[in-house]
Amino acid sequence: MKRIAIAGGIGAGKTAATDRLAALNFAIVDADEVARRVTDIGAPAWQALHDAFGDAALDEDKSLDRAFMAEIVFHDPSALKRLNQITHGHILNEIVRQLDEAKGPAVFVALPLFRAELREILTLDEVWSVQSSPEVAVDRLIKYRSFSERDARARLASQIINEERSSLVDHVIWNDGTLEELYEQLDVQLHRLGLSRG
């Protein structure tokens, strides 16, 4: 079974790519979904985050206040470092568990933040990066996720640039156009690996 990471910054279209692969019946492991699961009420990472950030980190129902956490870590590098120290081990362990349990000819793992060491940790065969120009990404964040232009640009500015991301991956899938054009590029990569459906 091939293990392939789909990397991509905010607004690039990583989710559109993995939705397409899921529709083709490939197994998908979503790092964002895993991060939500390991911080559910009562999970070890939830307790550690509560201990570290206090009651302010929780909603009224005691679930993690994700909007509050996103706001605080976005503006405070030390808070982001603490959040990552608490959650990364739990997230990686769960991703590995899901990869090990996946069935079919290939499994794809969606990673918003790809680091070179993840190649070995997750025993990846390839890494693909879905990328778009900053202007297209900003437009998508405003149109589809209700970001203000200021917030959208700030989020993009906090991430690595396309050139740096390109240097870490095996294949870049450019996504400034239509969904059909994105799908065509995915099909090219699948055909190259002898894959058509999961």
Image (cartoon, rainbow, N blue to C red):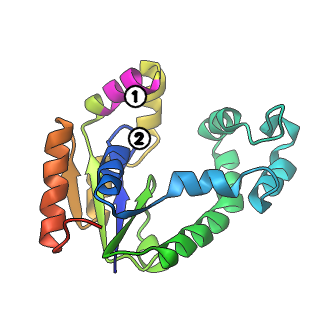
How many neighbours does mark 1 have within 10 angstroms: few (below 14), some (14-19), or many (20 or more)? many
Q: Which residue is mark 2?
A: 10
In the displayed structure, would residue 69 be above or below residue 140? below
Picture quarter with the N terminus: bottom left
At horizontal 35% and vertical 59% (from top left) the residue drawn is 6
At horizontal 67% and vertical 38% (from top left) the residue drawn is 66
Percent position (x, y) of residue 63?
77, 41
At horizontal 60% and vertical 68% (from top left) the residue drawn is 94
Tell me which corner region of the image, top left, top right, bottom left or bottom right, holds residue 176: top left
Q: Residue 162, can we see it?
A: yes
| Residue at mark 2 to residue at mark 1: CA–CA distance | 8 Å
In the image, 161 versus 103, the foreground residue is 103
Q: Residue 117, can we see it?
A: no
In the image, 46 versus 159, the foreground residue is 46
Taking 197 as reference, is 80 left or right?
A: right
Taking 31 as reference, is 198 left or right?
A: left
Q: In the structure shown, which secondary structural element does the residue marked by tag 2 occupy?
A: loop
At horizontal 36% and vertical 37% (from top left) the residue drawn is 11
User: The residue under label 1 is which amino acid type?
Assistant: Leu
Q: Which residue is mark 1?
A: 141
Q: Which residues are magenta?
A: 137-145
In the displayed structure, would residue 116 be above or below residue 187? below
How many neighbours does mark 2 have within 10 angstroms: few (below 14), some (14-19), or many (20 or more)? many
User: The residue under label 2 is which amino acid type?
Assistant: Ile
- Ranked by sequence position, the earlier of labels 2 and 1 is 2
